[in-house]
Amino acid sequence: MTGIDLLITGYPGVSPSNGGMGWSSVGLVRSGERIVLIDTGPFGARDLLRRRLAERGVAPDEVTDIVLTHCHHDHSVNWTMFSRARVHVSRREMEWALQVPHGVGPVPELYVRELASSPATVLLDDESEVLPGIRTEIVPGHTPGSLIVTVDHDGTRTIFLGDAAKNRAELVCHRVDATLDAPLSKDSIARIWTRWEEVPGTTVVPGHDLPMVLRDGGCSYLDTRQTSVQARLSADFDDVTTFDLAEE
């Protein structure tokens, strides 16, 4: 193992007037000669994702593996950016996503159909080893085949949670918003806590929040939020208003 990085940090917000933001976390793991992405972000993250990869000396066609925590568009749709990558996804998730009626919910129907027929797709069972040191486990609720991805590296452990627990609030209160099965989600969060506590110092990366560790029995952020929106609200093209969304 040669490193774990967070390319994009998710944001725990929605817009009541304009719908879900879909700002999700994207992880990068280097495992020997393999370059692995944990989720791929939404359409709006494409340019940012290319820039963040370039800053780390990685071209899209050098990514060898993608692990999708689930099939919602904000986590999966950019798999098409990586032409040489194997795409790992839960078998249970794929079977479910293919049956979702078109136009219902956040599953990108046509992308899922293409993924299902792609020779690059690797279907994972309930617990799977993607590569040495990278393991997945199904944690249903948000979707039937949602995965957590555990990465062991150089004596440390990082767990990417996808949307099994989207943010700190869900981890703390064991209640989940936007889930297909609330009781299953509650059970999955209990399992996440068990995994979190197994190895001292384990970092968890929610699908829509900052990375965290356990300190004094509580969830402590490892980073500071840097999130903003720029808007042209006047007739002057050069007049740009910036809204800082970094406050907790």
Image: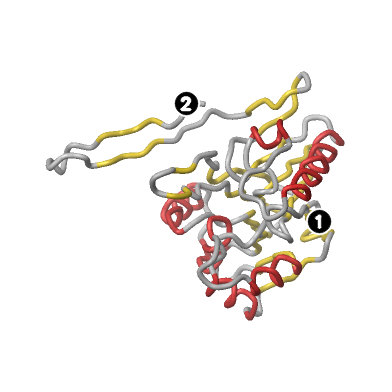
**Mark before the other along the chain sequence, 1 or 2:** 1
Quick one: 52 or 232, which is closer to the camera? 232
Q: Nearer the viewer, residue 130 or 2?
A: 130
Compared to residue 16, the image places residue 69 above or below, namely below
Is 97 left, or right, of 188 in this rendering? left
Q: Position of residue 21 (x, y in %)?
A: 46, 47
Residue 91 falls in image quadrant: bottom right
Residue drawn at 53 percent across, 75 percent down: 110
Q: Which numbered circle lies on residue 229?
A: none
Q: Position of residue 92 (x, y in %)?
A: 76, 67
Q: Which residue is mark 2?
A: 247
Q: Residue at x 78, y 66 (%)?
A: 124
Q: Is label 2 in a helix, a strand or a loop? A: loop
The CA distance from mark 1 to mark 2 is 38 Å
Decide if residue 68 is on the left or right side of residue 123: left
Q: Residue at x 84, y 33 (%)?
A: 197
Q: Which amino acid lies under the numbered mark 2 shown in the image of this protein?
A: Glu
Q: Which residue is mark 1?
A: 132
For the residue marked with disc 1, what is the amino acid?
Pro
